């Protein structure tokens, strides 16, 4: 299986840092669409961009298996080092969205100098969908009781997706029919729940196959990899991001959140 990438370096001969751009869950070609491959070199930073497996001109089958994708990121990093040669200063990753789960795995398997996570999360995929549903309900000013119903519906739908459509469809459909007449129903979105809300069982199974969700580790817990890391990491998050809701991960309004807990564990004397 062949991955296809491109190294873009700033003009000149001096040593430069290089950032390997790790994809999210998108299906389009990173070689064609990633703007950071131009923005970083314009600021004196090298960039290595590659099409994830099963997209663009890379080979293989699309997957959301974080372990497989972490190994692909390491292969891209090693190729970036080889191509940069004597101009290489430091090297690390930038990963957005799904890349926030992939990059911490990669840095623990092969040394790099830094990692940047943009709108990534320190929660599971299922928890991401739950947080997204809750944030949608908050933005639409729905009550705690209505939010509880929306989350019940979300859990049922998530079960269907997690099992590839093999379990939980009847329960999900019953809740969907029960709550559809209620005024809050139209505001339920979530990270992936929205995609299956209008679909029957056969359509859901087809959509799971079409979007390559079969290998998604829906219950992957990212904190062990983060605790094990000794690589300096910069996390850039949006407090009101509906697609990557950050309250549990790092939002100060949530109190002792996961990244704050991790920082306290790593740096107990840091005020």
Image (cartoon, grey):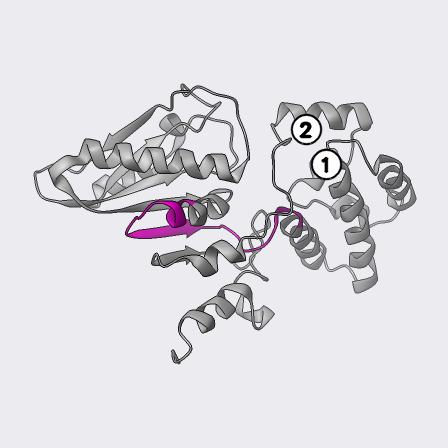
- Would residue 205 appear left or right of 78 to someone viewing this image? right
Relative to 66, is 226 above or below?
below
- Whole-percent x, y for residue 44 in the image: 18, 45
Helix, strand or loop at disc 2?
helix
- Would residue 85 appear left or right of 48 to someone viewing this image? left
- Whole-percent x, y for residue 182 in the image: 87, 48
Label 2 crowd bin: few (<14), some (14–19), many (20+), radius 10 Å: some
Label 1 crowd bin: few (<14), some (14–19), many (20+), radius 10 Å: many
The boundaries of the magenta stretch are 106-126
Q: Residue at x 42, y 70 (%)?
A: 266
- Whole-percent x, y for residue 220 in the image: 59, 47
- Whole-percent x, y for residue 19 in the image: 29, 43
Distance from disc 1 to disc 2, alpha carbons, whole Å, reads 7 Å
Q: Quadrant of the N terminus?
A: top left
Q: What residue does disc 2 label?
A: 208
| Pointer 1 with pointer 2, Cβ within 8 A | yes
Q: What residue does disc 1 label?
A: 161
Q: Earlier in the sequence, mark 1 or mark 2?
A: 1
């Amino acid at each position: 299986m062949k991955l296809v990438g491109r190294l873009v370096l700033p003009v000149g001969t001096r040593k430069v840092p290089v950032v390997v751009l790790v994809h999210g869950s998108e299906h389009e070609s990173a070689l064609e669409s990633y703007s950071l491959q131009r923005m970083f070199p314009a600021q004196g930073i090298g960039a290595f961009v590659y099409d994830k497996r099963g997209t663009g001109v890379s080979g293989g089958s699309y997957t959301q298996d974080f372990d497989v994708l972490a190994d692909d990121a390491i292969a891209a990093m090693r190729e970036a080092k080889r191509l940069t040669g004597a101009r290489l200063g430091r090297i690390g990753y930038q990963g957005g969205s799904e890349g926030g789960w992939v990059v911490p795995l990669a840095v623990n398997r092969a040394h790099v100098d830094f990692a940047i996570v943009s709108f990534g999360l320190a929660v599971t995929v299922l928890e991401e969908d739950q947080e997204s549903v809750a944030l949608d309900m908050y933005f639409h000013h729905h009550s705690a009781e209505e939010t509880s119903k929306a989350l019940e519906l979300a859990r049922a739908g998530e079960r269907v997706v997690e099992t590839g459509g093999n379990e939980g469809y009847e329960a999900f459909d019953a809740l969907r029919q029960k709550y559809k007449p209620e005024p809050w129903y139209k505001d339920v979105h979530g990270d992936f729940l929205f995609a299956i809300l209008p679909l029957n069982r056969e359509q859901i199974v087809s959509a799971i196959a079409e979007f390559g969700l079969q290998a998604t580790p829906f219950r992957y817990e990212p904190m062990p990899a983060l605790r094990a890391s000794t690589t300096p990491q910069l996390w850039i998050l949006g407090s009101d991001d509906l697609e990557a809701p950050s309250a549990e991960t790092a939002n100060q309004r949530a109190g002792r959140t996961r990244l704050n807990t991790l920082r306290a564990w790593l740096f107990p004397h840091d005020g």
